[in-house]
Amino acid sequence: MEPEEAVRQLEYAIDASLDETGQRAAAGYRPTFERVAERADGSAVYALACDLADEVVGGDCPSPAEANATAERVLDDWAYTDGGA
C-alpha cells in the first residue's frame, strides 16, 4: 500500500466513525506513512493503516505522536517477522 492510499483509507474510516472531518485529521498521518514506506514496504504501510483504522473504529483518533509510536511498533514487528533491515 502506498502512503497516499493509506491516508485516504483513514480519511474514510474517520468520516464513517468519528465526528471529525477525515481529510483534515488523516493529513497529519502522511509523514508517518511516508517514513514507514521509506524504511519498510507496502505491507508495513498497510499494517500501520489497519492498526490506526482499528483505533478510529474503536472511537479514538490517534494524535500524530501516537501514530508515530504505532509506526515504530509496526516497523519493529516488520523487522523481526519479515527480515527487514
Image: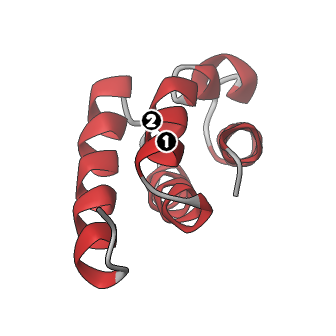
Asked if residue 19 lies left or right of residue 40, the reply is right
Look at the numbered discs 1 and 2 and tell me whether their residues touch, using CB distance below 8 Å. Answer: yes
Tell me where residue 7 appears, x and y as whole percent. Answer: 68, 38
Residue appearing at x 74%, y 23% in the figure: 23
Of 56 and 50, which appears nearest the observer?
Answer: 50
Q: Residues within 10 Å of mark 2 (few under 14, many from 20)?
A: some
CA distance separating discs 1 and 2: 5 Å
Q: Residue at x 29, y 62 (%)?
A: 85
52 vs 25, left or right, is: left
Q: Nearer the viewer, mark 1 or mark 2?
A: 1
Residue 24 point in image, percent of width and height: 67, 16
| Mark sitting on residue 65 | none
The furthest residue to the front: 85
Callout 2: helix, strand or loop? helix
Q: Residue at x 65, y 40 (%)?
A: 14
Residue 25: x percent and y percent?
A: 59, 22
Q: From the viewer's perspective, is 48 left or right of 12? A: left
Callout 1 secondary element: helix
- State the image coordinates of residue 41 (x, y, percent, origin top left): 54, 59
* Quadrant in which the N terminus appears: bottom right
Q: Which residue is mark 2?
A: 35
**Residue type at numbered disc 2:** Arg
Q: Going 45% across and 60% down the picture, which residue do you hit?
A: 51
Neighbor class of circle 1 (other Cα within 10 Å; few <14, some 14-19, many 20+) is few
Q: Is residue 65 above or below residue 55?
A: above
Can you tell which mark lies on residue 38? Answer: 1
**What is the residue that sits farthest to the bottom in this orientation?**
81
Residue 81 to residue 73: above or below: below
Callout 1, which amino acid? Answer: Glu
18 up-or-down from 50: above or below: above
Relative side of 74 to 37, left or right: left
